[in-house]
Amino acid sequence: MLAAFDRKKILIVEDDDFLREMYKSKLEMENLHVIAKTDGAQGLRALEKFEPDLILLDIIMPKVDGFEVLAKIRKDKKYKKFRKTPIIILTNLSTREAVDKAFALGANDYLIKTHFIPSEVMKKVQKYIS
């Protein structure tokens, strides 16, 4: 367990049940407080109540996609206090256009789901919340 993680809050916004629960489980094992939502609309609603220290955000989701969530967090006055909250994109979109768009909208990092293992996600989380 990493002491630097104590009481840090992570918001996971991921529509894939298996991945969402896997990330949640791994992060909770590190003594992080985790809340997980299944789509962008739920994620935005949870943001103000939960006030996360970091957001793990999928792109391809129903209702409100990750690009829209990212844009709202970084630009909408309603979410002003979260503009500097680190956002790590976790997606299967691997096109140069998708990566460029995510960074242009304010993502801090971009991981392609099929190219990483959970321990790599933990390293990225540690990088941004330690």
Image (cartoon, helix red, strand yellow):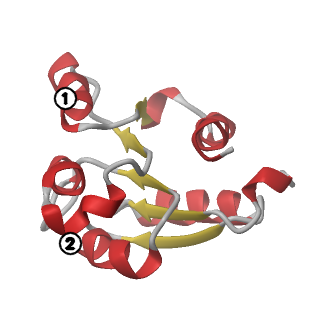
**Left or right of residue 84: residue 130:** right
Q: Residues within 10 Å of mark 1 (few under 14, many from 20)?
A: few
Sequence-first disc among 2 and 1: 2
The kind of residue on which mark 2 rests is Ala
**Left or right of residue 5: residue 95:** left
What residue did someone put label 2 on?
A: 41
Look at 59% across and 59% down and name the residue there: 22
**Left or right of residue 51: residue 106:** left
Residue 124 percent location from the top left of the image = 59, 36
- Who is closer to the viewer here, 99 or 77? 77
- Cα–Cα span, label 2 and label 1: 21 Å
Residue 127 percent location from the top left of the image = 63, 35
Residue 7 percent location from the top left of the image = 70, 68
Which of discs 2 and 1 lies nearer the camera? The answer is 1
Check the picture and name the quadrant holding the C terminus. Answer: top right
Question: Hey, which residue is sitting farthest top in the picture?
Answer: 96
Look at 23% across and 49% down and name the residue there: 74
Determine the secondary structure under disc 2: helix
Q: Residues within 10 Å of mark 2 (few under 14, many from 20)?
A: some
The quarter holding residue 91 reads top left
Q: In the picture shown, does residue 78 fall above or below 107?
A: below
The quarter holding residue 121 reads top right
Check the picture and name the quadrant holding the N terminus. Answer: bottom right
Look at 55% across and 66% down and name the residue there: 21
Q: In the picture shown, does residue 109 fall above or below 57?
A: above
What residue did someone put label 1 on?
A: 104
